[in-house]
Amino acid sequence: MVWVPLVPIDLACGGMAAYAQTHHAPEMVAERKNAADGWLAPIDSGAADGAQRVVLAPLEPGDVVIMGKRTMHESMANSSDRMRLSCDFRFFGEQSHSTKHYLDIAANTVVAPAAAQ
């Protein structure tokens, strides 16, 4: 996953925090079920078992945060009167699937998620 802030990110407008070395801990999400919108239910940060919490702020527009799809991360509270805007890009291989629409770059086609069975 690639996360790109489009506005300045500081501690007041929040941003993101990630937990170091949690990308090798799939057991934290193994029992979680996808919500109706396709996202996993939130994970209690206590499940990180002492992993170092890294606050990703300050950041400037165009900075890039890159992490694996299993890296535990969280959105931080926005206590300012500014709107936090960002884009995230998710990349996955041909053998993977998505519960959301995505752009197949090789075919230049938007692909809808398969119907639930």
Image: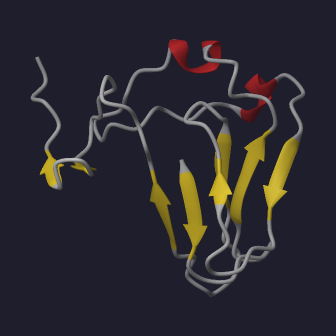
Give the x, y percent position of residue 92. Answer: 40, 36
Compare residues 108 and 99 and report the one nearer the observer.
108
Looking at this view, name the residue that lies furthest to the front: 106
Q: Residue at x 16, y 48 (%)?
A: 107
Q: Is residue 50 above or below residue 12?
A: above
Residue at (26, 43) in percent of width and height: 100
Q: Name the foreground residue: 41 vs 102.
A: 102
Position in image of residue 54 (x %, y %): 84, 49
Left or right: 12 in relation to 90: right
The answer to which of 16 and 106 lies nearer the viewer is: 106
- Give how far across and how far down residue 37 sits, in percent: 30, 41
Viewed as shown, does residue 66 lie left or right of 69? Answer: right
Q: Position of residue 1 (x, y in %)?
A: 53, 47
Q: Where 73 falls versus 27 (above or below)?
A: below
Q: Is residue 99 above or below residue 26?
A: below
Is 83 left, or right, of 74 in this rendering?
left
* As drawn, 34 above or below 11: above
Task: Indicate the colouring scheme.
Answer: secondary structure
Instruction: Give the quadrant of residue 83.
Output: bottom right
| Figure quadrant of residue 84 | bottom right
Q: Residue at x 56, y 20 (%)?
A: 29
Between residues 89 and 26, which one lies in front from this camera angle? 89
Image quarter (top left, top right, bottom left or bottom right) of the C terminus: top left
Q: Quadrant of residue 112?
A: top left
